[in-house]
Image (cartoon, rainbow, N blue to C red):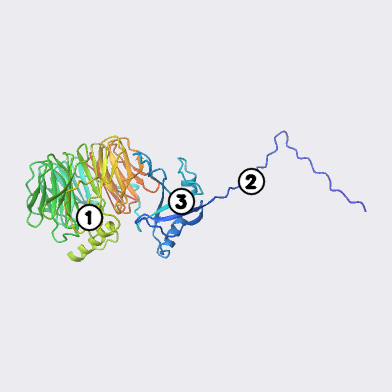
Amino acid sequence: MATLLPPPKRIKRTHGTAEPRVEPEPVTEQAPSVVVQLISEDDGTPMGAPINLQADLARDALELLANTLQGQADDPVPFAFHVPLPQAGESQEGNAPSRIAITSSLMENVLNAKSGSGYTPEDVIPIYCTPQAVFRVRPATRCSSTLTGHSSPILCASFSPTGRLLATGSGDTTARLWDLDTETPSHTLTGHKGWVLCVEWEGRERILASGGHDGHVRLWDPIKGKAIGDAMKGHSKWVTSLAWEPIHINPKAPRLASSSKDGTVRIWSTATRMTEYTLGGHTAAVNVVRWGGVGNGVLYTAGSDRCIRVWDADGGKLLHILKDHAHWVTTLTLSTDFVLRTGPFDHTAKQPSSDEEAQRLALERYESIVSNHPETLISGSDDHTLFLWKIFPPNASSVSSTSSKIKPTARLTGHQSQVSHVAFSPDGRWAASAGWDRSIRIWEGRTGKYICTLRGHIAPVYRLAWSADSRLLISASKDSTLKIWSLKTQKLHTDLPGHTDEVYCVDFVADKVVSGGRDGAVKIWKN
C-alpha cells in the first residue's frame, strides 16, 4: 500500500509585517575558579590554607566560610572583607585607594572592577577578614522631636554614657539637660557668665562638667539639675575643651582636665574642687585635651603653637613634644575614645553595682580595644594634614619619657583646606576626618592608609560622629543638613535636612542621633 504523505504546511500569512525573529538563548559564561587566602585583619595571620572557590561566590557564603574556619559556625560573627590593591604598597598616593571592599562577590568587585584591581584568576587573592560588631545600629531616617528652649545657637552637645540623658551648651550662657527616653527637657543649668563652649560627662554619668567663655569650669548633678558647689576658677581666658580621667584608672572620684585659650591645662580634683596642678609649656592657646588610658593615665594636649604635648597624668611630668604640624593643631582623637567615654556601659545596658565592678568592666572594655593594637592618636591641623602617632608600645603598663624624637607613623594628606574634626570609630579600625573643603575622608585606623572620600555636603563639614557598631558615620555641616554615610558601600545612606541654619554639633547613641546648631533647636532623629 502506497505511503500517504502529510498535507503541505499552511503558509503563514503575515499581512506585510516582518516575521518575528527567535532570539537564540545566550550562552552563560561560567565564572572562573580562583584561589583565595583568608587572612585575619586583627593579627595578620592566615585563617587556614588557600582555598579554591568559584569567583562568583556570594559575600554571605564567604562570611559562612570565614566563620567555619574560625570554628564558630554555630555562633557566627559578621565579617567585612577587603582585598588590598597590589600597587598600593609601592606608591601610596594621598588620593589613591589602598583596598577594594567585597560587597557582592570577587567576580564583580575585584576581577571585573571598573578601575582595574591588578588581580587575575591566576593569582592567589588575599582576602582580609574584619570582624564586625555583633549588634547592629539602625540608621536614623526621620526627625522624631524638635526641642526648643535655647535662645542662642547650640555650640556643643554630648550624650551621657548610658544614652539616657543629653547635655547641650549654648550661647545663651546656659547648659540644658534633656531626657532621651521621653524626649523632653529635664533641667536648665544656669551659672556661667558667658557662652557654654563645652560639656563633658563623667564615665559613670554621676557628674556633668561644663566649660565657658567666662573661663570657669562648673560641675553639675544631672539627677537634681543643680550645681555642685561654686565655679572652679583659675583660667584667665575661655575654656576650649574638657576631658575626664578614665573609669578603669579612677572609678571613685575621677579628675577633670580643662584646656584654655590662656595656654594652660588645669587638672581639677572633683572631691576638693581645687586645681591639683597646672600644665604650662604651650606658648599659645591650647585647643584640645584628651585623657588616654595607658598606664596610670596620659594627657595629650594640642595647641595653636603647632605642638602636641604628651604628659604623665600622675604628677604632670612632660613625656614628649610632637612638633610635625606646620599650623595650629585643632583636633585630636584616640582609638580608645569611645570606650573611655562610655566607661563600664556597653550595648547590653548592664549597670555596675560598685566602684570595683565598674572599674573591672571598664578595664575589660579598654583592654579588648588595645589587645591587638596600642592606643593610637590622630591629630588634625589647619595645615590641611593629619598625623597618626603610636607613642606607647602595645600593652604598655607604665609610661616613661624617651630622649629620642617620636616620629609619626603616617601622614594623612588629601584635604584641600583646614581639617575641622577627626574621629576614630568605636572599634578603632577606621578614622574619619572632616574639612572645610566640604569632604569627609575615611582612613585605616591602624596604618593611616587612605580608604575613600565621601562627598555630598555643599559647605564646610563641622563635626562627625560614629555609630556604636562602627558601620555608620554621621556628619554635620554649614549647609544645614546632617548626612549618614554607610561604611559598607562607602556612599551616602540617608540625608537628614530639617535645620534652618548651620549645624554645629552632632552625637550618635544607640539608634538615636541628636543635633544642634545656629537655629537654637535640638533635633532628635531616629529610625
Q: Nearer the viewer, residue 334 or 324?
A: 324
Q: Residues within 10 Å of mark 1 (few under 14, many from 20)?
A: many
Q: Nearer the viewer, residue 526 or 213?
A: 213
- The earlier-in-sequence mark between 2 and 1 is 2
Asked whether the residues under the numbered discs 3 and 2 touch, taking CB atoms below 8 Å apart as contact, a structural biologist would say no
The part of the image, by quadrant, that contains residue 485 is top left
In the image as oriented, which residue stretches furthest toward the top? 16
Rendering coords of residue 122 (x, y %) = 51, 49
Q: Residues within 10 Å of mark 3 (few under 14, many from 20)?
A: many
Task: Determine the secondary structure under disc 3.
Answer: strand
Identify which amino acid the numbered label 2 is placed on: Glu
The part of the image, by quadrant, that contains residue 235 is top left
Q: CA distance from mark 3 to mark 1?
A: 38 Å
- The earlier-in-sequence mark between 3 and 1 is 3
Q: Nearer the viewer, residue 252 or 417?
A: 417
Q: In the drawing, what numbered circle is on residue 118?
A: none
Q: Residues within 10 Å of mark 2 (few under 14, many from 20)?
A: few
Residue at image point 42% right, 61% down:
67
- In the displayed structure, 419 sits above or below 356; it is above
Can residue 384 be seen?
A: yes
Mark in the foreground, 2 or 1: 1
Task: Provide the residue designation for mark 3.
Answer: 125
Task: Provide the residue designation for mark 2.
Answer: 25
Identify which amino acid the numbered label 3 is placed on: Ile
